[in-house]
Amino acid sequence: MLSTLQPPRSLTLLPFRRFHGSKTIASLASSSPTLDASSVSPPQSQILTTRRSLLSGETTASEIAKSYLSRIRLTEPQLKCFLHVSENVLKEAQEIDQRISRGEEVGPLAGVVIGVKDNICTEGMPSTAASRILEHYRPPFDATAVKKIKEMGGIVVGKTNMDEFGMGSTTEASAFQVTANPWDLTRVPGGSSGGSAAAVAANQCMVSLGSDTGGSVRQPASFCGVVGLKPTYGRVSRFGLMAYASSLDVIGCFGSTVADAGMLLHAVSGYDRFDSTSSKQDVPEFESQFLSMDSFESKPLKGVRVGLIRETLEEGVDSGVRSATQEAASHLEALGCLVTEVSLPSFSLGLPAYYVIASSESSSNLSRYDGVRYGNQVMADELNKLYDCSRGQGFGGEVKMRILMGTYALSAGYYDAYYKRAQQVRTLIRKDFKAALDHNDILISPAAPSAAYKIGEKKDDPLAMYAGDIMTVNVNLAGLPAIVLPCGLVEGGPSGLPVGLQMIGAAFDEETLLKVGHIFEQTLNGSGFVPPTLPNVA
Amino acid sequence: MATRALLAVLSASPPRMIRIKVSTFPSSSSSSSIKFQRHITIARCFSSDTNPSVLQPPDVSRLAETARISLTPSEIEECGAKIRQVIDWFGQLQQVDVSSVEPAIRAEMEGGNLREDAPETFENRESIRASIPSFDEVYLKVPKVLNKE
Amino acid sequence: MSTTLFRTIQPNHFTLLTTALLRTRRTSRHISVRCQTSTTTQQSSSQQQQPRTSAPKNHGSNKLDEILKDYEAVIGIETHVQLSTSTKAFCSCPNSYGSHPNTSICPVCMGLPGALPVLSSKVVDFGVRLGLALNCSLSLKSKFDRKQYFYPDLPKGYQISQFDVPIASGGYVDVDIPLEFGGGHRRFGITRVHMEEDAGKLLHSDAGDYSQVDLNRAGVPLLEIVSEPDIRSGVEAAEYGSEMQRIVRYLGVSNGNMQEGSLRCDVNISIRPIGQAEFGTKVEIKNLNAFSAMSRAIDYEITRQALLYNQGQADQIVTETRLWDEGAQKTVTMRKKEGLADYRYFPEPDLPEVILTQEYVDSIRASLPELPEAKRRRYEAMGLGIQDVLFLANDVSVAEYFDEVIGKGADVKSAANWLMSDIAAYLKNEELSISDVKLTPQELAELIAAIKDETISGKIGKQILFELLAKGGTVQGMIKEKDLVQANN
């Protein structure tokens, strides 16, 4: 258990180690882990803190909810993380307070303020996947993940911005607004779950749900300096997640700590009779992994075998990212891990294979948006005109492009050359990962080839944008779990830009990732990745 | 007859290509079937290797028609250039030797997860109906359609 | 061999002469309202009208006969069978015919964002049952695919179906051609049986300038049975269809009702000059809601195509879908197919593979009822004539009743006679089915025994029969009550 109680993460600027003008800022990891008290205390789980402070009567759910709502009010004009903020937050918080005052039991997420990506259905609350075609659409049911959160007392604070239907890496492809990176308002928060990542980074909510088809949780986590957890395919029900690429999509979790991301994952995991691709594998009690630093041995990760993926540090990766990753590897070594380099020969093939599969499946999954049963309809005197116009006006440019590419790849005569071939490459990638994970407990790599870039920088160059997904797509193709957590800063913005480390585990072994991730996080010298205070909030 | 049509379908878009689909799904192996499986033989009759050199570049207008998306002329131009660029880039997959590799539909998973045949009524049907843009008391309304395309 | 035989015995029934048409149409209307016994009704009624002559080769007026000297028709049938499950295929919505429009709906069958399909185990059960009944090999691992096209009755923009690995394939079905159509035994190949979902219903309002959609049927489970192109005539096609209907009813997988659309047949037909190896241009015929209509539509289409061949206009035969127009008794173009549709099939990622264990298949095989063909052969072996055999085996409840009666030791021929004559007439008059009558098989056996051992006369037996049919009771009780024992006892 974490040793200290702490109110919700301070809204003010926390001190953290500044870079000193060098081109690359070294990772915050020191070559030997500092297990004694450092100048900054390690980050604390907000879920555990909330639970304790509510049960001890130190604070109330209403007070917590109010502070988050006012934080949202203050920061939203700059950040634009939310597409919708719930009107029921205070009401739900009051209900929790009443239950506590009556001595009734409350769920493990009671009072936890949670952002939900807008492609995850929330009953009666707008759920648009940031698409014009679903503007004002309110689903008649909760996604299974949302249902579980609510049953455990979690409060859905609102729906977060994203690239339309998850198609993008910057959140610029939202039909409604562009979200800013809290570390530098001129930069993208990453995507497609950019709103969920930025909202956690800016402390607009404690944790959030995102979705990850090719890196949409992990890359924005890296860009925003938060923890992003992509579970094994099938670990979390996809029921209620608006499908982008069904064979790759997973619901993932954001938190400011590994513990928060892990506890949120635990809450939403498990077999669901409404998703026949969800797994019946047991969900372990992750919480026991989140030991406090006091209980760490001198080499807490002794014997853990870590494979550093060679192909992820080759050309095309920013030098700052590369050195931060290498520093992180050294830090793991210092914690007792056995770090070796591993090679995944099929690595570079993953990117085109991913884009073939994702666009093919999306071309099919988005056929249902035809303006007939829900969403925006452009009435016409002829059926095909109704379809053409409803879809033509309802979808944004990137979505149209991917639907057309997918339509092409699935066409007669092209299927074998594209879709089937991509599925065969998927088999190769799976085999390579399996071989690497036979000899290693986890694999590590950067989460993205660079830190957050400028808004608009890659908007018109699809291939440049796609190249940014190279670190993450293979993991989706193999269906494996992965966690991204901040490991350093590079130059950029007013106070540096965070860099994320990706740890990849064997299927259904989120436990090892959370254990290693938690210890890594808690022992990182000078940890505490809090973005600079927003200009007008100081 | 129908199988023949299924296995070698003339393409509507892009033009003049024959779709050839070889049954390489794992279950095609004779060990997993009880008796001789007729469809494999049929599939083989029509199979041949796809020759990448005959792949035509995308015709964006036709694709848009197939996908039921109206595009403005400028969109066709802009989108078309990008799509061709990406499809060219997809071309690198043609260089990979995958001759003996089974395609993977998704991550490995246990099969089954079937449902009992027990009816349940979805309670919130009123909300579903309320979302229908053109609803005529009991029916969804669409422009007059005569024949299925 | 039976094909040749068949070709020479074409009764007037199939000519396009007006008189024959009128007669046929009358027959067909009669059949269409009494679907349960369509085939046998057709047999008996046409038999009455047209007793088979010993010289079946008739006059030049038989156009079709002439045509079939020079041309061979190649026919394959796709049969869609709506399954009688309690729920839809991929969601738990009630599968109930005739509900108020758009009430049996949920996020899954409405194709709402985020909804996912979950397959009902019953659909697999039924698929395996039908596959085994059609002598198919089963795929122990089959999968679903998406067939993509846009249409308002298709909520997701794709139909979940099975493409390259159907649950069952490579089977056959045996049928008996009724005597009046030449008789004989025919075997037709079954290419495949696959699971899929139905689309909703599109209604075309006459008044308004719009169409209406009812999605109650969207997602209802179907089995599609594809035959090999082994069928050569309308009669064979009708007999093939009837056998499918009997089989699904015997198995209890569907009510097989054509009027409700629970059993739908689409016909693919081409003709080619006899001796030509390659197939002619294939035409599809839809909208066939009775087997008699199917038979007539096919024969019309054979004639139409042959005429075009004979006039040197074979190029006028194009790949198209034609509709059977019952009023005009002809097929009309519904739509031309410009190239074949590209459905962009790909494996359905939302559904795991369907995995069958050998144990499961064996248990289903063991639970299969006796099927129509086996019943017919058994009845035949009992010494019943083919007319009786076809009548008794046609309706599963009649067959079961008959089996119970003879199970009680009743004389086989007497039991068949009672069922086919007096009881059949009673059912027809009262518009009842065998399961509605009060007479138990036990008592029918008693009645037959009482007549046989001359406890009562045949005449008195008939009297008792009608009372028992209407009111129930026992033969012994009736005899005692009415003191009906024959005098000589």
Image (spheres, coloured by chain):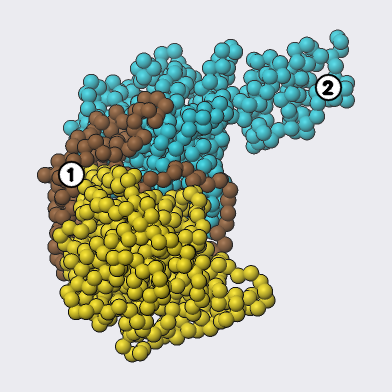
Chain colours: A yellow, B brown, C cyan
Q: Which circle, 2 or 1, is nearer the viewer?
A: 1
Q: Is residue C155 left or right of residue C414?
A: left
Residue A38: horizontal and vertical position, in percent?
Answer: 38, 75
Please check whether the numbered discs 2 and 1 fall on a single chain.
no
Helix, strand or loop at mark 2: helix
Regarding residue C114, the answer to whether it shows in the image is no
Q: Is residue C430 left or right of residue C124?
A: right
The image quarter in which residue C291 lies: top left
Q: What chain does mark 2 sit on?
A: C
Which label was assigned to residue C78?
none
Regarding residue B110, the answer to whether it shows in the image is yes
Residue A414: horizontal and vertical position, in percent?
Answer: 21, 46
Q: Is residue A43 left or right of residue A98?
A: left
Helix, strand or loop at mark 1: loop
Q: Nearer the viewer, residue A289 or B49?
A: A289
**In this picture, is C228 found above or below A295?**
above
Residue C127: horizontal and vertical position, in percent?
Answer: 47, 36
